[in-house]
């Protein structure tokens, strides 16, 4: 999970890109970067840390030009915490390209070997995003055949990228002197939207991971980038051009985006994140009423911030008062996306402080968006007990997370996931709660109201182990887990990758 932005404007674009990254900061706090284009010259600055810490006034002044892309990074399993891994990535051949990527490729090792042995291209980091950039560069070179690159050839190259790459990817890229390109994988797993605004000098376009970046900066949301679709906008400005570059594409967006990752004020694939979280709370409340009709609760308390809409609707469904029992320190990062278990555990009590009177002598129902490793849940339950709660129940607006998410979210090993091999009673014991209540997967899918938005299926792999790209099985997951536990980078055995790719 990362945040990406691409803008073609009629005036300097540096401030717009910076502001858009600030709005997408929740999608990645590990690193940030901006690249702009001035004629045939790229200007780029990137580094580790939050957006506000990476960029200084002198850095912003050096980002010249009216076209640019930006990226905020969340490290996935096996990736290094290194300035070299910060995006955008750059190659100077064949045309000069910078690229930002949100997602995770599942055939990285195969592609890396092909780039080295067949395409004669060098990849310098462990990042699958750099692999993706070099695949795109090679395919652009192949279709252009040494000539000036055209719009038609750009779409042809993206078609060839889709043929080679597996997994999840939403991409923004700039080609020096040519324009901005954006595309989304054939399943539409990771989100991507496009917006437009009329400025005094002409039409401007923005492409971003979430609609909130468009709304806050005055752009009107046009639509989502469709699965397998590519967009192109010329460097000198002009109209937006699009092409479906993967004929067999189908929309299967990641359901965890709506559960946790996205901001509630975003709309993705036509679905309001806020509304879905309200529906999730209502469904969970009805489920608790069915499973435990005798349950006596004095107050419903959310774990801020993501679970608030669900907790509010759950409380209304149960007819129980809703209260704010935890105050969040907004200067501590989101614990789920911190790149290490030790960091997550250490930050919980720095991040949240309890309001004692909301817990003392009460039976409380805590509501969170999900339970992944259980580290945060365990600490929060103990905080409630320390404040004098008589009973502490815990509700998850999502179903049990039992499988890794290989499409760009750091859920790498089944052994790290609290729900693996445990029923609800065992999970309650692990986190110290009197009882645990999980959302039903069918109810979660129903909360999305996908049919109303033309979506027949969601990627629910972290809940049920069904991986929509068709190239992930038990052997793949075992290799992934073994390499992570050995402390190695995320590069699977080449022969294995070749077998799965060939059979998919």
Image (cartoon, rainbow, N blue to C red):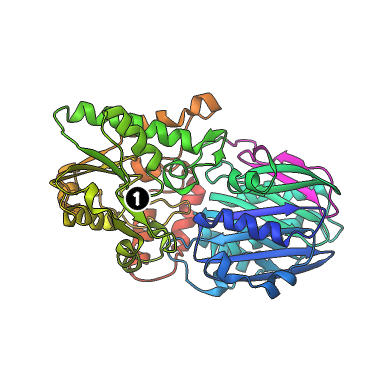
Look at the numbered disc 1 and give the secondary structure of its residue: helix
Left or right of 244, for residue 235: right
Q: Residue 253 lies in magenta, yes or no?
A: no
Q: Residue furthest front?
A: 357
Q: Position of residue 137 (x, y in %)?
A: 70, 61
Residue 92 seen in the figure: no
458 relative position to 11: left or right: left
Horizontal placement of 276 versus 64: left or right? left
Task: List the residue tagged with mark 1.
Answer: 474
Q: Which region shows up in magenta? A: 221-249
Residue 494 in the image: x percent, y percent?
Answer: 48, 62
Residue 337 vertical position relative to residue 45 in the rendered view, above or below: above
Graded by Cα atoms within 10 Å as few (under 14), some (14 to 19) or many (20 or more), the crowding at tag 1 reads few
Residue 150 location, x and y as percent?
Answer: 84, 51
Above or below, comparing residue 177 to residue 406 in the picture: below
Instruction: Decide which of 29, 390 is in the foreground and name it.
Output: 390
Please indicate whether residue 468 sits to the left or right of residue 420 in the image: right
- The image quadrant that residue 440 belongs to is top left
Number of numbered tags placed on the structure image: 1
């Amino acid at each position: 999970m990362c945040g990406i932005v691409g803008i073609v404007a009629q005036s300097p674009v540096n401030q717009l890109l910076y502001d858009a990254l600030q709005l997408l900061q929740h999608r990645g706090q590990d690193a940030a970067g901006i690249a702009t284009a001035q004629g045939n010259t790229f200007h780029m600055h990137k580094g580790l840390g939050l957006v506000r810490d990476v960029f200084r006034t002198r850095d912003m002044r050096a980002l010249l030009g009216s076209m640019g892309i930006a990226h905020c990074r969340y490290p996935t399993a096996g990736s290094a915490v290194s300035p070299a891994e910060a995006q955008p990535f750059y190659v100077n051949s064949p045309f000069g390209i910078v690229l930002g990527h949100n997602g995770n490729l599942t055939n990285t090792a195969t592609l890396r070997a092909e780039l080295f042995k067949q395409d004669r291209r060098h990849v310098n980091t462990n990042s699958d995003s750099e692999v993706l950039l070099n695949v795109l560069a090679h395919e652009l070179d192949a279709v252009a055949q040494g000539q000036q690159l055209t719009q038609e050839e750009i779409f042809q190259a993206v078609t060839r990228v889709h043929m080679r790459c597996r997994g999840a990817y939403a991409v923004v890229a700039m080609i020096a002197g040519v324009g901005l390109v954006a595309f989304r994988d054939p399943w539409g797993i990771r989100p991507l939207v496009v917006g437009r605004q009329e400025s005094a000098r002409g039409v401007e376009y923005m492409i971003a991971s979430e609609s909130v970046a468009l709304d806050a900066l005055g752009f009107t949301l046009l639509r989502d980038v469709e699965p397998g679709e590519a967009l192109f906008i010329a460097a000198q400005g002009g109209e937006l051009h699009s092409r479906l570059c993967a004929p067999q594409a189908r929309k299967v967006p990641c359901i965890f985006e709506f559960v946790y990752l996205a901001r509630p004020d975003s709309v993705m694939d036509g679905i309001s994140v806020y509304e879905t979280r309200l529906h999730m709370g209502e469904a969970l409340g009805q489920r608790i009423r069915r499973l435990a009709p005798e349950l006596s609760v004095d107050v419903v308390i959310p774990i801020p911030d993501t679970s608030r809409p669900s907790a509010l609707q759950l409380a209304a469904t149960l007819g129980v008062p809703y209260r704010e029992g935890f105050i969040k320190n907004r200067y501590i990062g989101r614990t789920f996306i911190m790149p290490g278990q030790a960091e997550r555990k250490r930050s919980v009590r720095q991040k949240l402080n309890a309001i004692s009177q909301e817990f003392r002598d009460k039976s409380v129902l805590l509501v969170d968006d999900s339970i992944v490793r259980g580290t945060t849940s365990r600490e929060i339950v103990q905080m409630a007990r320390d404040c004098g709660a008589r009973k502490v129940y815990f509700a998850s607006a999502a179903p049990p997370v039992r499988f890794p998410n290989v499409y760009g979210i750091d859920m790498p090993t089944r052994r790290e996931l609290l729900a693996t091999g445990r029923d609800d009673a065992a999970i309650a014991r692990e986190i110290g709660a009197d009882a645990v209540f999980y959302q039903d997967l069918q109810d979660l899918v129903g909360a999305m109201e996908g049919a109303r938005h033309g979506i027949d299926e969601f990627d629910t792999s972290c809940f049920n182990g069904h991986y929509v790209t068709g190239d992930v099985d038990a052997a793949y997951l075992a290799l992934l887990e073994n390499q992570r536990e050995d402390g190695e980078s995320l590069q699977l055995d080449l022969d294995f990758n070749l077998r799965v790719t060939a059979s998919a």
